[in-house]
Each structure stands twice: as structure tokens, then as C-alpha cells.
Amino acid sequence: MKSSNRISALLWADILVAFALFVMQDYLTDVWNLSFTHAAAILNLWNGMSMVLQPFFVVLVDALLGNFTMLLISSTAYSLGIGFVAMSTPPVLGTCNRYEQECIGPTQKPLFYAGMALIAVGVAGNNVSLKPFLQEQEDRNLDAAPNFCLKIAGAVFVAIVALVGAIALPYVKPWSLRFGIPAICTVVATALFLTGLCCYRYDRRGAEGSQVKSLCRARMIPMLTTFVFCGVVSSVGNTYFVEQASNLNRNLGKWKVPPQVLLLAQKAAATVVSEALKSQGVAAGKGVVTAISFAVLCCITAARMELRRLRIVRRHGLLEKPDEEVPMSIFWLIFQFVLLACLEKFLEKSVEKMNEAEFPDDEGERRYPDNLAKGVSGLGFMCGVLSVYVVGEVSGRGGNASWFQDTLNTSRLDRYYWVLAALGAVNLFVYAVVGLCCRCFNR
């Protein structure tokens, strides 16, 4: 088996885990009986931590570990993490076989939180080292045609794994198996990765002092603070967007589609946008402006969809029936997921363009500002938790009802989205000022 296939197995397992964790919001609200804001806070802090770790891991990789050792650590952490999450479900280690709050005891909670922390380490390490290590293994003896065929085969297999995660996995009802199947796949992928120990090329590129050098040279750093807002908007994707979708009508003809179809649509849109930007290109500064604009449009669209959902809830007398199905198609939410994909891809490609401008001759140094941008976006995920708390406190003053209640039907999530849209407009103005001062819009 080729070395690249062994390494790619880690990527395939990552995709399957991502689809399993997409419905973690539902697990925490339905099984742990947490409020939707509490569940979202846990997931956003976890997502934020997995991103904040990346710039630190890049320095660690170049200064000490190398990509292979980081992948060894991260894949092991990934396997243990998703395994702990599977074991934290009540029927595995508990005395209670029901997926209910009463069955979440002193054994389940530590296992769950330890598992999520390990998954954050796994996500960060794989994001930092998987692609670079895969590039180190490229067979330089193969001509362009076989390499192209191998890449096409890999892309097809990734698509198959994504379809399995989006369509097949949701039909597995027990939560223990929903998390357990990806756990088994991750362990198998890690074992497969380890079988190539004697075959890999190891490129320990020492970067003694270069990573400080690169961060000091990166004139884009003052503008990275504007990326926090994009992180706040991205944080609602796997939390509040999922909560909106949880009780909507999922019928497509006679087929009841799983909620993961929304994540599949988001990933498909991200692929289309990525390919379009490869062929058309975009100036870094203009790309960031476009990304923030998509963030604002995403918030406006989400607000309008939530207002539509609330009107239907009131019309059918479902305000105090949070578990009842709302007669509104889940496909109305595809628009906000697609806009979220556009935001993330434009931001990613813009950072790449900035790095190419700053470091035209050193591809290795580009990793530092790139991962620093991801870390700043991760801070945005964490700031999203703070923003919900602040908005909830402010909206509840003067005897008014807070916009965030125990259930989504009695909350006003649409107003929170409008607040984010307004903040996005301010953020766009600030970035425009900084961009003009740095004269980087055409770079």
C-alpha cells in the first residue's frame, strides 16, 4: 500500500468523525437535557480550542517534533478522544440503558469532557501536519498522469466517506454506535498509518528562530483581529443552525433526510467555491471584504429563516411544545449553510494570498500567519459564547424577557442574528479602514 493511502486514511476518519459530531448539539440537549445555549457554549469552546492550538502546534512541529511525530500524537489523541465520547454514553459504562439525563452520572461526564479535549488536540494536530506530511510522501518518480489519477481516486473516496457520514450514519439510532462506529474507524485509520513507519520519508525541517522572524514580518497581523467576527459567525454553524434544524420537517418525498445533509451541502458549496477561486483568483484584501460580506448575509438570512420558523411555531400553537415537529422544510436552512461555506472559503483563500505576498519564496514560513489566522478565528468561536451571554443579559434588563430562554421556540434567536449582522457591518468598516491604511486591497 502506498504511503499516501495510509496517511489519507486519517483524513477519511476525520471526515466521518466530523459528521458524527455535527449532531452533538442534539445529543447534549436531548440526552444531557442542557439548554441549547449551554450546549452551544460547550461546543463553541471546544471548536475554538481546537483552532487556537494550531499556531502553537506549528511552532512545536518546526522547532522540535516534525510532522510525523505530531501526526502520531494527534491521531492517538483523536482515537482516544472519540473512544472516550462513545464510552461516555450511558449504556456503555453506566448501570442505566436509557439515553436520558438521569443516566448521565459521575463516570460519563469526566469521560465526555476528556474525550472532547483529546479530539481538540487531534483536530489541531491533523490540521497542522496531515497535508504537509502527505506532500513529503509524494512519489517524485511518478509522472503527472499517474499522480493526477491518484488524486482523483482520493477525491472520489473522500466523497464516498462524506456520503456515508451524511446519509448512512444518521440511521444508526443508538448514540453509543453513532460515536462508536467513527471511533472504530479512527482506530483502524491510526493503525493503518502506523504500518508505514518503515516506508515514510521524514523531513525534519529545523526552523530555528524562523517562526519568530515570520510573525514579525507578517504585516497582516493588525488585520487578523477583524477575523474574530468571522469566527463568531462560523461558531453558529454547528450549534444554533443545528438547533434550528432539529425539529423541522425533513421529508423529501417519502424519504426522511438526516440533518447531516445540511453539512454535506455546506461541504459541497465549499468545494465549488474553492475550485472557482483557484481558476478565477481573488485579491487578498478584496477576498476578506467578500468574506465579511458573506458573514453579514449569512446572519441576515439566518435571522429571516428563524423569524419564518417562529411564525409557523406560533401559528400552530407549538411555543410550549419544543419536541413537536415544525411544519417547515429543513431545506430552507440550506441557504445559510451555503453562505457560511462561502464565508469560510473566501477567508481561507484570502489568507493564502496574503501569505504568498508576504513570503513569495518560502512556502514553509507561510504556515505561521495562516495558522495564526485560524487561531484568531478560534478566539472568535470563544467570543461567540461571551456574545450570547452579554446579549442575553442586556436583552433581559428592565423586566423584559431575555432573548435566550430554555427552548428555541420561546427564544428570539433571530434578534441575536440581527445583532451579529450589525456587528459585521461595523467590522467591515473597520477592516476597510485598516486595509486602506495598509494599501493591501489589491495584493
Image: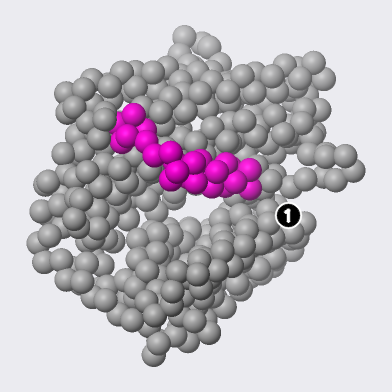
**In the picture, which quadrant includes the C terminus?**
top left
Give x and y (percent) for residue 60. Answer: 23, 65
Give the dominant element type of the magenta stretch: helix, strand or loop: helix
For mark 1, what is the residue?
Answer: 167
How are the residues colored?
one colour
Numbered range of the magenta stretch? 263-288
Give x and y (percent) for residue 348. Answer: 38, 43
Magenta stretch containing residue 63, yes or no? no
Q: Amino acid at mark 1?
A: Ile
Direction from residue 47 to residue 248 in the image, left or right:
right
Q: Which residue does the image show at 75% across and 22% down from the upper left?
A: 313
Residue 5, visible in the rendered structure: yes
Give x and y (percent) for residue 309. Answer: 70, 23
Q: Which residue does the image show at 39% across and 54% down from the upper left?
A: 50
Q: Is residue 382 placed above or below 205 in the rendered structure?
A: above
Q: Residue furthest top?
A: 398
Q: Give the camera-side residue of 132 and 423.
A: 132
Direction from residue 342 to residue 305 in the image, left or right:
right
Q: Give the camera-side residue of 241 and 165.
A: 165
Residue 33, visible in the rendered structure: no
Give x and y (percent) for residue 4. Answer: 46, 75
Q: Is residue 72 placed above or below 392 in the rendered structure?
A: below
Q: Which residue does the image show at 43% across and 77% down from the upper left?
A: 142
Q: Secondary structure at mark 1?
A: helix
Magenta stretch containing residue 283, yes or no? yes
Q: Quadrant of residue 15?
A: bottom right
